[in-house]
């Protein structure tokens, strides 16, 4: 029923709009909420009730594989025993963190798609953004939503799983199976909480490198990612230049700006101001700082869009009513949308993880590790770079990408740079943006030729018709990983 | 920067072949205003150069990247300043000088970034342009200058003699110069400047710091 309403809404949306927003599984799931004939939810009212509503809508979209009950307990079970491949690193193999702590033991949860070739030369590492996870091309085990990057990764897609072995790890400090503040501290048997050591982007990359070592992969064909994922890409290229054949940092920066740190601080303070946060020990207390985390997500979500996109999508349209109610109800569609963003987020994300991972981004300043000169981070690098930015991205605006490009030029690196014209803001990297796929596809194919990897079986998507065929094929993508998702380690 | 849409080397862009001949095989080249990458592709295939490009138009950059060329989206007027000294053997500006805001600054940057600079440009002193202007009294629209005055990206036209003047002003030396006629053939090699200035439709200069 809910699904049908969601589809009805998508049909009601006009033309391109519906396709493009609907193309992204997260957005598609989120749009469904507008069709619920429920009264609008007061954020101060009962987030968990509203959250349950969202989750039922998301569940109904889920593949048959994920029909589990969406409970906090189930989400928490993903923390220590994820529905993913898992690499455990014992006491003999600690992770030395930038803050000086040796983290041990720790674990990395990851997903893979495609086959590693005999030379182990076709491995692609996808680095995920702030609140995404390793489930980039399979249904999410908690929400049941489709993978977050099926537009980019899958059979016949620019990152073609018929040609490449794609790896995506949950980052250090996150909450989908890699060790983070929600994980159990082996010394106390309780969740780490704020006792978890502070992690950095470089720590995340160090952890990933340990996994790549364990997989026996000497050099990655490509490392790519957007936003915080792009920061990891830059860190990979700087820390392990000989292990990265080509790098694709999208909508990112070599340092986090003051404005972005400011937004993150607002989010963290919202979490900490929630009485249910309990100084970070909410798991033991049996509470959840859902209101605080929800507000943090709402604020952050605004920064992922653009004024134009918000106006185009919502304008001043009212939500399921003909006139304002003269109350603090979500009268406007944009309010309802943001509240839903907040509510659905708290269902799948850990509040302390949000604190840690945002902090890691804040601390990121690649040049600082190289005497303040970014070019030195890439000196002598043979990695081929393709830097991508979006015109309407005000979180990581084009000048941030240009700074990276200039540094690469100064270091004599091989670099391409495209600024893609779109009004969809920072989130454009997750959406169906043909220019992004054309650029990525061209860059990846040329790099594959240079590395002596086999060419694509068929020419990639020259027109819309074949793109549709490709997206049909992409529907099959989860089948590859479904077996892996089921097998816990 | 001019947006050059070239399917392959078109007859009006024979200057690209002349430019390619001036580049030593295996050198490092920056092509400023590289359009769809026709010259970079030519250079990498025929001269084995390690080529980079700058192009203003997104469509051009996408085409280049799809061809496997290393091209960044940027503007000759604003982005050359970010390049360090002496990182390229050649910096090429083909049919783009007249579209820059500050041709002198661009040329100076080229000579700083590269050991040599190669510049090709349409000669506004060509006899057809002169007669067009003299007898019709209107801004000429020709094969190589195909835009009306109000929508042309070409804002700084010069003649061959004007360009030689700029070369002297920035203390550069002409290592080689070729004037091409309408058919793309070199105009008589040992002719004086005034002769080239009348009969050359395009000119290609190989420069180095003086």
Image: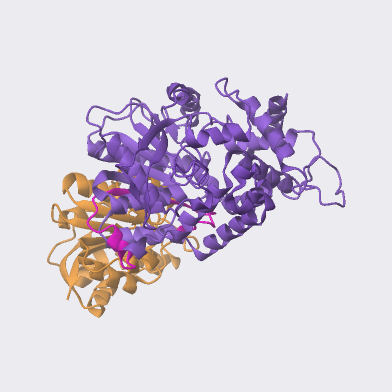
Chain colours: A purple, B orange
Tell me where the magenta segment starts and ends, as one range. A370-398
Which x, y percent locates residue B159?
Answer: 30, 70
Residue pictured at 22% horizontal, 30% vertical: A119
Quadrant containing the N terminus of chain A is: top right
Front position in the image: A83 or B144 = A83
Residue A445 lies within the magenta run:
no
Find residue A386 and report its horizontal and vertical position in percent.
36, 48
- Eyeballing the image, is A14 above or below B145? above
Which image quarter: residue A162? top left
Q: Is residue A376 magenta?
A: yes
- Horizontally, residue A358 falls left or right of residue B59, namely right
Observer able to see residue A28: yes
Residue B6: tell me if it is visible.
no
Give the residue at x 34% y 69%. Answer: B81
- What is the x, y in percent for residue A49? 74, 37
Tell which of A236 and B209 is nearer to you: A236
Front position in the image: A251 or B41: A251
């Amino acid at each position: 029923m809910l699904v049908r309403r969601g589809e009805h809404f998508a049909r009601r949306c006009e033309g391109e709009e519906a396709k493009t927003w609907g193309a992204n599984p997260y957005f598609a799931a989120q749009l469904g909420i507008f069709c619920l004939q429920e009264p609008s939810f007061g954020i101060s009212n009962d987030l968990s009730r509203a959250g349950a509503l969202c989750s039922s809508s998301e569940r109904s979209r889920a593949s048959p594989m994920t029909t589990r009950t969406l409970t906090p307990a189930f989400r928490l079970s993903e923390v220590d025993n994820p529905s993913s491949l898992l690499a455990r690193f014992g006491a003999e193999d600690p992770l030395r963190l930038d803050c000086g702590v040796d983290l041990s033991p720790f674990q990395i949860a990851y997903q893979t798609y495609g086959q590693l070739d005999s030379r182990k030369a076709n491995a692609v590492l996808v680095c995920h953004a702030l609140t995404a996870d390793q489930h980039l091309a399979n249904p999410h085990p908690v929400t049941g939503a489709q993978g977050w990057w099926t537009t980019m990764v899958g059979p016949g897609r620019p990152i073609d799983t018929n040609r490449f072995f794609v790896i995506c790890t949950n980052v250090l400090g996150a909450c989908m199976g890699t060790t983070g503040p929600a994980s159990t501290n082996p010394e106390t048997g309780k969740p780490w909480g704020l006792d978890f050591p502070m992690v950095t982007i470089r720590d995340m990359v160090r952890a990933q490198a340990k996994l790549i070592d364990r997989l026996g992969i000497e050099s990655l064909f490509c490392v790519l990612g957007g936003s915080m994922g792009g920061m990891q890409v830059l860190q990979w290229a700087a820390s392990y230049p000989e292990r990265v054949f080509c790098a694709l940092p999208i909508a990112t920066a070599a340092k986090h700006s003051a404005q972005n740190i400011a937004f993150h601080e607002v989010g963290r303070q919202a979490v900490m101001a929630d009485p249910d946060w309990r100084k970070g020990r909410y798991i033991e207390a049996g509470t959840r700082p859902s209101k605080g985390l929800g507000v943090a997500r709402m604020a952050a979500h605004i920064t992922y869009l653009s004024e134009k996109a918000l106006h185009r999508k919502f304008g001043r349209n009212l939500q399921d009513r003909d006139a304002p109610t003269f109350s603090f109800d979500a009268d406007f569609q944009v309010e309802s949308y943001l509240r839903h963003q907040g509510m659905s987020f708290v269902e799948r994300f850990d509040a302390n993880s949000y604190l840690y991972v945002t902090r890691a981004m804040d601390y990121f300043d690649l040049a600082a590790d190289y005497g303040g000169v970014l070019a030195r981070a890439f000196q002598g690098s043979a990695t081929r770079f393709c830097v991508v930015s979006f015109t309407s991205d005000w979180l990581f605006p084009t000048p941030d990408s240009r700074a990276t490009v200039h540094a690469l030029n100064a270091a004599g690196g091989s670099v391409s740079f495209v600024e893609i014209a779109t009004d969809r803001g920072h989130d454009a990297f997750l959406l169906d943006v043909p220019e992004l796929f054309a650029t990525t596809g061209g860059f990846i194919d040329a790099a594959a030729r240079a590395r002596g990897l086999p060419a694509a079986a068929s020419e990639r998507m020259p027109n819309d018709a074949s793109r549709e065929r490709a997206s049909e094929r992409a529907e099959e993508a989860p089948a590859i990983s479904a077996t892996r998702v089921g097998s816990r380690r | 920067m001019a947006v050059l849409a070239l399917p392959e080397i078109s007859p009006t862009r024979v200057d690209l072949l002349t430019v390619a001949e001036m580049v030593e095989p295996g050198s490092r080249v920056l092509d400023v205003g590289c359009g769809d990458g026709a010259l970079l592709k030519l250079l990498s295939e025929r001269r084995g150069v390690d080529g980079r490009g700058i192009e203003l138009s997104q469509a051009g950059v996408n085409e280049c990247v799809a061809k496997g060329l290393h091209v960044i989206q940027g503007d000759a007027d604003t982005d050359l300043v970010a390049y360090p000294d002496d990182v390229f053997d050649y910096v090429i500006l083909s049919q783009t000088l007249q579209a820059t805001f500050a041709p002198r600054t661009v040329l100076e940057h080229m000579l700083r970034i590269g050991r040599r600079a190669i510049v090709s440009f349409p000669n506004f002193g060509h006899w057809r342009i002169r007669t067009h202007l003299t007898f019709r009294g209107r801004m000429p629209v020709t094969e190589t200058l195909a835009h009306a005055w109000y929508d042309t990206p070409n804002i700084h036209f010069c003649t061959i003699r004007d360009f030689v003047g700029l070369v002297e002003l920035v203390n550069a030396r002409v290592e080689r110069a070729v004037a091409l006629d309408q058919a793309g053939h070199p105009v008589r090699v040992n002719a004086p400047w005034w002769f080239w200035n009348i009969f050359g439709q395009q000119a290609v200069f190989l420069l180095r710091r003086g």
